Amino acid sequence: MEPNSSSNDNNKMQLQHHSSCLEIATMEVHRVVPPRHKSTIEKLKTRLKETFFPDDPLRQFKGQPLGKKWILAAQYIFPILEWGPNYSFKLFKSDIISGLTIASLAIPQDSSFVPPLVYTVLGSSRDLAVGPVSIASLIMGSMLRQEVSPTQNPVLFLQLAFTATFFGGLVQASLGLLRLGFIIDFLSKATLIGFMAGAAIIVSLQQLKSLLGITHFTNQMGLIPVMSSVFHNTKEWSWQTILMGFCFLVFLLLTRHVGTKRPKLFWVSAGAPLVSVILSTLLVFAFKAQHHGISVIGKLQEGLNPPSWNMLKFHGSHLGLVMKTGLITGIISLTEGIAVGRTFAALKNYQVDGNKEMIAIGVMNIVGSSTSCYITTGAFSRSAVNHNAGAKTAVSNVVMSVTVMVTLLFLMPLFQYTPNVVLGAIIVTAVVGLIDVPAAHQIWKIDKFDFLVMLCAFLGVIFISVQEGLAIAVGISIFKILLQITRPKTVMLGNMPGSDIYRDLHHYNEAMRIPGFLILSIEAPINFANTTYLNERILRWIEEYEAEENLNKQSSLRFVILEMSAVSAIDTSGTSFFKDLRKAMEKKGVELVLVNPLAEVLEKLQRSDDSGDFKRPDSLYLTVGEAVASLSSTIKAPSANYV
Amino acid sequence: MEPNSSSNDNNKMQLQHHSSCLEIATMEVHRVVPPRHKSTIEKLKTRLKETFFPDDPLRQFKGQPLGKKWILAAQYIFPILEWGPNYSFKLFKSDIISGLTIASLAIPQDSSFVPPLVYTVLGSSRDLAVGPVSIASLIMGSMLRQEVSPTQNPVLFLQLAFTATFFGGLVQASLGLLRLGFIIDFLSKATLIGFMAGAAIIVSLQQLKSLLGITHFTNQMGLIPVMSSVFHNTKEWSWQTILMGFCFLVFLLLTRHVGTKRPKLFWVSAGAPLVSVILSTLLVFAFKAQHHGISVIGKLQEGLNPPSWNMLKFHGSHLGLVMKTGLITGIISLTEGIAVGRTFAALKNYQVDGNKEMIAIGVMNIVGSSTSCYITTGAFSRSAVNHNAGAKTAVSNVVMSVTVMVTLLFLMPLFQYTPNVVLGAIIVTAVVGLIDVPAAHQIWKIDKFDFLVMLCAFLGVIFISVQEGLAIAVGISIFKILLQITRPKTVMLGNMPGSDIYRDLHHYNEAMRIPGFLILSIEAPINFANTTYLNERILRWIEEYEAEENLNKQSSLRFVILEMSAVSAIDTSGTSFFKDLRKAMEKKGVELVLVNPLAEVLEKLQRSDDSGDFKRPDSLYLTVGEAVASLSSTIKAPSANYV
C-alpha cells in the first residue's frame, strides 16, 4: 500500500459509515463477482506448493546477496549451522551430563557411535537420543532368519542385515526428500500422550528383568508376556539385586523430585544417574557383588566397529527379502523415531520439521549400514533419559558417541563392573516421569473423542505393540474427520435484532427468524461424501418449516438462503447436488439463493450449470443481510412493506 | 412463532435499520455469548442421531393416529407398500416387457427365482435386476475349494456353499440394521460413471464368447486374459454365429436408436430384445442351426430348486472357512449390488436408501440360502438390460422369476433352441448405452481431480477387477478429502469500500486492507491434521505483512483477526494451537482476536484456556466489521481517529 494509505483509510471508514446508512435507505447491494480465471496449471501449482512446501523454504532467500544465500542453504540442509554458532558453554554443561548419562545406557546395549554424529548434524530435534530400538531389531532378525540362519551362516546374515539397514535408510530419506513429512501431522497430541504413557509402562516393565535380576526373560514387548515371564521365574529373583535396585530407585526418584521442586537444584537430578552408575560400579567392584547374584555388564568385545560398505550386497537371491525387510523396518523405526521426536518437541513447545527428521534418520542409517550398525532411530527410553538428564541440544549425542568410542577403545574394563540393575533404575526413573496424567485429564475435559483416541494409543501400545497402537489411534482420528465430512453441520440462522447480522438461532437466543425465509449455513466442503446427507437434511429443514407454517399460519416459505462462506470446496457431486436441490425447490415454489460462495466454489457452480441460474444476480448475494433486504422487497406477503 | 410475528418483524426490520445507523455512531457492538451448556450425553445423542438416522425415520410418525402409524411402519419396512398401491397397468406394461427380457437372460444363467421376489418386497431400487454375479461366485468357489473338492464331495460342497451364502446374507443385513448405509455415500458420481463404463466394457468383452462362438473361453474378467483367450482360439470362431450375432446386433442397435430418437416409439426398443429371442429361437429350430456351429442353450435340468435349509451346517470343521467365505463374498457382492443400484438411481434422479438396500440384499440371500441359491445381488449386465427394456418398478423382477419358474416347470423344451449369441447381442446393446461420454466430459470441465478419480475407477475395473477398481477410486477420493483437511485454505480478508463487509482480497479486487490489521479467515475444522500447517501458515502471513510494512513504512501490525465462521469443529490439538499462537503473537506485540467462533468451538476454547484470554470481551467479536471498528478506536497510530 502507498504510504498515505492509512489516512485514506480513515476517509474510507468514515465514508463507509455514511454510505452504510445510505445503503439501507437506497438498498444498494454488493454483487458477487466471478473470480479471476486461473488455468488448471496455475491451480495445480499453488495446490502442490501448499501441500509440499507450506513452509515455503525459499522465502528467506528472496532478495539476499549470493553469499548469504549459500549460508542460508547450508543452514537449511544442516540445522546444526543454525544453532551451532550460538552454542554456549552453559548449554554444553547440561549436554555433557546428559550425554554421559545416555552413554552409560548405550555401552551395554550397542556400540553404534557413528549414527548419532550424523543425526547431530542433520536432525532438528533437541532431545532425540539415537540408538537401536528393540521392535525394529526383532522384526529384522525374524524376517532375515526366514532365509538365512545367523548361526550357520553368520557372515551372510551380517551382510543381509547391513544391506537391509541400507535400504531402510534409503526409504526413510526418500520419504523426506519427497516432502511427505506431513504424514507425521497425523500423530495428534492426544495420540502422542497415549503413546508416551504406554511406551513408558512397556519400557519400565522391560526393566523388571534387571531390577529383579531375572536371567530368563521374554524378548516380547507386550504386557502379558512380560508379566507372565516375570512370575514364572520367581525363583530367579535375587534379593541382592532387588535391594540394590530399590535403593538406587529411591535415590534417583528423590533427586528428581528435588530437581523438579527446586529449579535451582536442577543439577542434582541431572547428575544423579551418572553418579549412581559410578557409585554402583565402585560398590560392585569393592564387594565383588557380581559373585553374589548381582548381574553386571561384564566383558564386552573391545575395539571400534569396522567399516562395512564392502559387506553391502545388492545382488544375489536374497535381494528381494532384504529390500522388503529394509522397507518394513525402515518405516517402523521411522514412525517410532518421529513419534519420540514430536513427543519431546511437544513437551518443550518447539517444532520438528518432519521432512528434515526423515532425511536425518535416513542418512544416519545409510551411513550406519557402512559402519557395521543395524537400523537405528530415536530410541524412546534413551531419549527419555536424555531429556530427564537435562539435554539442551543434539550435542548430547556427540558426547554419547565420543564416550562410547573412548570406552570401547580404552575403558571397557571399568564398565564391566557396572550392574545392570542400576541402568534399569535409571531408565524407569526417566520414563515414569513421562506419564502425563494432568494432560490426559485436560483432554478428557475438553474433548471426549480425543480422550478415546488417547486411550486407544495407550492400550494398543501396552497390549499389542507400539506400531499397532499408533496405527489404531491414527485410524480412529481419521475416521472422526471423515465422519465430520460425511455429516456436516447445517445451522439455521436468524437475525440479530437491531443489526443486519445473522447468526445461529440455537446459539444466540435473541436471534429471530424472518417469515418467508429459511436461512441455512453449511459448515463443510460439499462433496460426494455428504451430498446425499445434505440433500435429505435440507429438505427436512424445509418440511419442518412448512409443518410449523401450517400450525401457526405464518407467511409461507418463499426463499431458502444458503450461507456458503464455510463451504471451502466443492466437487462434481456437489455441483449436481445444487442442480437437484434447485429442481426440488422449484417444484415446491421455493427459490434457492446462495450467499457469498467462495471463489473456487462459485467458479465450479457457474461452469457446471447450463441454465445460468447461478449467474442470475437475484440468486447470488454477498451477505445474508443484503439478500434478505432485497428479496423481501419482492415478496407480496405482509412482509412486503419491509423497506 | 406467534401468528402476528410477521408484523412484529416489519417493526423489527425498520427498527433494525435505524439502530444500525445509530450503532455506527455509538459503536455499540454485539457480544459473543457462550452457548447453552449441553451434557456429554446430550451431545453424543445428537451426534449419533445425525450420523445414523439423518433421515429421521420416526419423524413422519409424530402426531399420527395409531392405525396410521402401523401403516407407516409397514411401508418403512416394506417399500413395496409405498409404491404398490398406486401401481398402474401402464407401469405394468413396461415392467412385463423388461421382466420377460431379463428372464430370457436368466434362464440359461441360473435358476434362482426366490431372491428376486424377496427383493421386490424389500428393495428400494427400481432398476435393479437380481441374480448371481460372476466375481462373487468365482471367489466363493475358489475359497471353498481350498478345503472341499466339488467333484469328490459334491454334497458337502453344496452344503458349505449354501451356508456361506447364509452368512453372507447375515453380514449384509446386519450392516443395514447397524445403519452403516452411509458407507455407500463414498461411491461418488465420478466413481460410478467410471465404474459403469468399465463394467460395460468388461461385460461386452465377456459376450465375445457367445458372439464369436468360442467354446474354450477364460472365466477371468480382466481385459487382457479375455482378449488373449479371444485371439488364441481364432480357429474356434464360427462364421455362422458371427453372422447371426452381427444381424441381431444391428437390429437391436437400430431399434434402440429409434427408441431414443422418438420417445413415442419407445416400445420398439423395449420389445426388440424379446422379439429377437423368439425370432432367433424359431430360426434355429427351423434350420436346425444348432448343427451348423451355432451354440444354443440346450437342455437344462428341469424342475424348481428344492428347499435347502436342511443343508445349512452351523457346526463342523469347515465352519471357520465358511464364515470367512460368507463375509468376503457378502461384502463383495454388496458393493457391486449397491454400486449398480446407485448408478441407475443417478441416471433416473431418485435416491436409494443404503440401509434398506443392504437389508434387502441380505434377507434375499438368507432366504436364498434355504432355497438352493448361491449368493445373489444386483447384477450389472442384467440390470442394464432391465433398464434398457424400460423397467419402471421392481415388478419386473417378479415377472422374471415367475417366467423362470414357469419355464423351469413346463417350457424348457422351447428355450433349448435359443442361441447364446442373441443373448450376448442383447447384453452388449444394453451395456454400451451406459458408457456416458458427455458426463465424463462435463466432469473434466468442472473438476479435474474428479476426472482422475473416474479414470481410476474405469481403468481399475477394466484391468484389475470391479472391486479393486472401486476401492482405488474411493481411496483416492478419501485421500483428496484428507488433503483438504491437512492443508486448509486461509484467506486474507479486506474491507469492501462503503460497507462493513469483509471479503477475500484476491477474489474481490475492490476490497481494501486496513493498516495495522491482518484479517484471516480459516476455511476448515482445526484439528491434529492441520494445526502444524496453520501455525506455520499464519506466522508466514504475519512475516509477509511485516516485510511489506518495512518496505512502505505503513503502520505496524497491531491485531490479527481470525474469522472463525468456517471452523466447524476443533479438537485438543486445535485448542493448544490457539494457545501457542497467542503466545507467539504476544512475543511480537500483536494481539489475537477471534470473530464469530461457532458454539462448539467457543465452548472448547473457553474450557481449554485457564488464562481466560478467550473470555475477554476485546478478544471476541461477532463480526469482523465490529471488531475492526472497536479495536481501531484503541490504536494510537494515525488510524486512531477512525471513529
Image (cartoon, coloured by chain):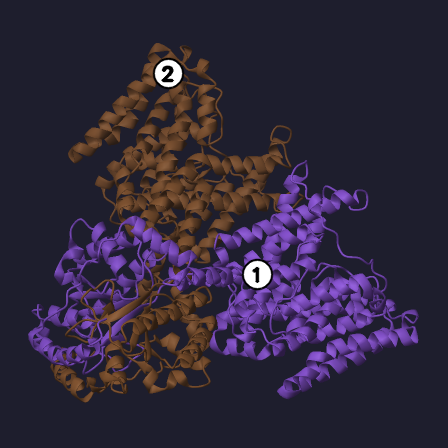
Chain colours: A purple, B brown
Question: Which residue is nearer to you in this view: B82 or B231?
Answer: B231
Decide: is B303 above or below A304: above
10 Å neighbourhood of mark 2: few (<14), some, or many (≥20)?
many
Q: Can the viewer see residue B458? A: yes
Q: Residue A26 lies in what quarter of the image?
A: bottom left
Image quarter where the C terminus of chain B lies is bottom left
User: Between marks 1 and 2, how big is the CA–CA gap?
Assistant: 72 Å
Badge 2 element? helix
Badge 1 element? helix
Q: Which residue is the site of mark 2?
A: B241
Q: Which residue is the site of mark 1?
A: A122
Q: Position of residue B210 (x, y in %)?
A: 40, 22
* A331 horizontally vs B50: left or right: right
Q: Can the viewer see residue B120? A: no
* B289 horizontally vs A222: left or right: left
Q: Residue B497 lies in what quarter of the image?
A: bottom left
| Chain under callout 2 | B
Q: Amino acid at mark 1?
A: Leu
Question: Which residue is nearer to you in this view: A79 or B21?
Answer: A79
Instruction: Specify the label residue A521 is tagged with.
Output: none
* A550 horizontally vs B454: left or right: left
